[in-house]
Image (cartoon, grey):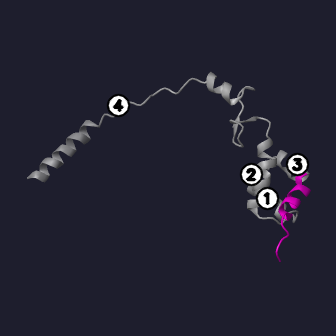
Amino acid sequence: MQKTRGMDKVEFYLNLNEIKSLYDQGYVVLKILYNKLKDEKKINMSYWSFCQYAKKELIGKISNVAPINNQNIVAPVIENKSIDEVGKVVAPAQNTKEEFKPDQKLWDLASKMREADKI
């Protein structure tokens, strides 16, 4: 039987209070939350549809995230500062790469093997 267009959205929003309640109780892994609701026969939608609405309603509205450049991408807020302010506070990473120094014994062994191949 074919679903009526928009039924996934209706299903999700009819159960939104329970979904938020479970999310606040610790069901933060969407797959586990989805399976719990599916097992209780509260929803019949696909996992993909569930994730689309859950990301919009739950993850996009977490209080400790800030939008980046007015996009839907979110980043953690550090000490109540926006992402632009955090960039000014955090020092740039230092280049800590060390020069590669091969092991002398291994180097000598490789040299002997090359000499042996020439004979």
How many numbered discs, if any? 4
Q: Position of residue 72 (x, y in %)?
A: 72, 43
Choose between 79 and 68: the one closer to the eye: 68
Q: Position of residue 102 (x, y in %)?
A: 29, 37
Choose between 94 and 67: the one closer to the eye: 67
How far is mark 4 from mark 3, CA to CA? 54 Å
Choose between 93 and 106: the one closer to the eye: 93
Mark 1, other Cα within 10 Å: few <14 / some 14–19 / many ≥20? many
Residue 108: within the magenta? Answer: no
How far is mark 4 from mark 2, CA to CA? 43 Å
Query: Which of marks 3 and 4 precedes in the sequence?
Result: 3
Say what secondary structure mark 4 lies in: loop
Q: Are marks 4 and 2 in contact (CB under 8 Å)?
A: no
The amino acid type found where label 1 is placed reads Tyr
Q: Are marks 4 and 3 in contact (CB under 8 Å)?
A: no
How far is mark 1 from mark 2, CA to CA? 9 Å
Residue name at image x 75 percent, y 26 percent: 80
Q: Which mark is residue 21?
A: 3
Q: Which mark is residue 99?
A: 4
Query: Which of marks 3 and 1 precedes in the sequence?
Result: 3
- Please name the residue that numbered disc 1 is placed on: 34
How far is mark 3 from mark 2, CA to CA? 14 Å
Image: magenta residue range: 1-16
The amino acid type found where label 3 is placed reads Ser
